[in-house]
Each structure stands twice: as structure tokens, then as C-alpha cells.
Image (cartoon, rainbow, N blue to C red):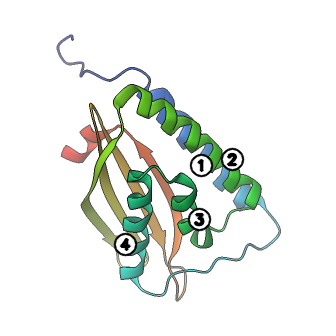
Amino acid sequence: MSRGRPFRAKGVAKITLCFSAALVIALTFHGQNTRAQTISGLISEDDTKKVCDQFLGKINGNDLNGAFSLIKPYIGIPEADFKVILDETTEQRAQMIRKFGKSLSVEFIQEQKIKDTLAKYTYLEKCKIHVIRWSFIFYKPEDKWILNSFYWDDNVRDLFR
């Protein structure tokens, strides 16, 4: 390990880059989609955190299908794009588990708000030999909260800024 250059577990950047790219692509196409999507939305801000807690509980139990079915009504992207995100995540999680070990636990670590319009929740997923950061951003355009974006990566250094 050289000075000034932190150790990084090999392969994590590639995994998270792929996941982030898939999500960005899906959301970009969503913005260009002329067909209106049905989004249930969540009534209260408390409900947004509960959905995140439940989602990560399923992730911790390695139930990706169950986790993604929880957020599907609140994200509002086309079915094909949603399936791409689920498939990419499934593949990348399998790689992650092979490299870092199974998920041990999940901890809520931070909530950030911008007025009554945006809410961001950050969690840590502890694995045998590495930690993963999960972030969820909810947006309230009118009277309901929708899941604007979510991502997972290993960039825990940013948590110390």
C-alpha cells in the first residue's frame, strides 16, 4: 500500500460502476419515456424510511426479488428497465459475496433533508471483509414521496467528510 493511496478491494469499483451505470441509464430512459408511469408514492416521510429498512432487511437476507418488489411501486420506471436493474444487481451481488463474504448486518447511519422536497437515507451493509454503502433519495413533487434514485457502492471515505 503506497502513501496517500488508500487500499481498495479489487473488483468493487467495477461492480459499483456497473450498477450505477445501469441505474443512470434506466432513469435517463425513464425521463425520455412518453408513456406516463404509475407511481404509488408514499404518504409520509416516515414511510420512506420504513421502505428502506424493509428493503435492506431483505437484501441482508439475500432476497433480492423480495427487496426489489418492495420498491417497485415507488420508483416509476418501465418494467423492462426495472428488470435490467434487478438482473444487474443479482449478478453483482453474487460477485460481491464471492469476494467479500455474506452480508452480516445492515445499519442506518444518516438522514439528510432538503426542506419538504428531498430526503436521503444512508446505510452500511457489513460483510465479512468489506462494507457497502447504500443510499436512497426520495422526492416529494406534490403530496406523495417517490423514490428518485438509489445506489450502492464501497465509497465509505465520503462518509467522513
Mark 1 vs 4: CB contact within 8 A: no
Residue at (59%, 49%) from the top-left corner? 23
Task: Please tell me whether residue 90 is drawn above or below residue 108 in the rendered image.
Answer: above
Q: Nearer the viewer, mark 4 or mark 3?
A: 3
Q: Is mark 4 on a helix, strand or loop?
A: helix
Residue at (74%, 60%) from the top-left corner? 79
Residue under numbered circle 4: 49
Residue 2: percent from the left, percent from the top?
21, 10
Q: How many numbered dots are placed on residues in this image?
A: 4
Residue under numbered circle 1: 23
Which amino acid, by three-letter code, is at mark 3? Ser
Could you tell me which quadrant the N terminus lies in?
A: top left
Q: Distance between the residues labelled 2 and 1?
A: 9 Å
N-term-proximal mark, 1 vs 4: 1
Q: How far apart are marks 3 and 1 (CA)?
A: 16 Å
Residue 99: percent from the left, percent from the top?
40, 26
Q: How far apart are marks 1 and 4 (CA)?
A: 20 Å
Pick the residue in front: 44 or 160. 44
Residue at (44%, 23%) from the top-left corner? 11
Q: What element carries label 3?
A: helix
Q: How far apart are marks 3 and 2 (CA)?
A: 14 Å
Residue under numbered circle 3: 69
Residue under numbered circle 2: 84
Q: How far apart are marks 2 and 4 (CA)?
A: 25 Å
Residue 20: percent from the left, percent from the top?
53, 42
Q: Is residue 24 visible?
A: no
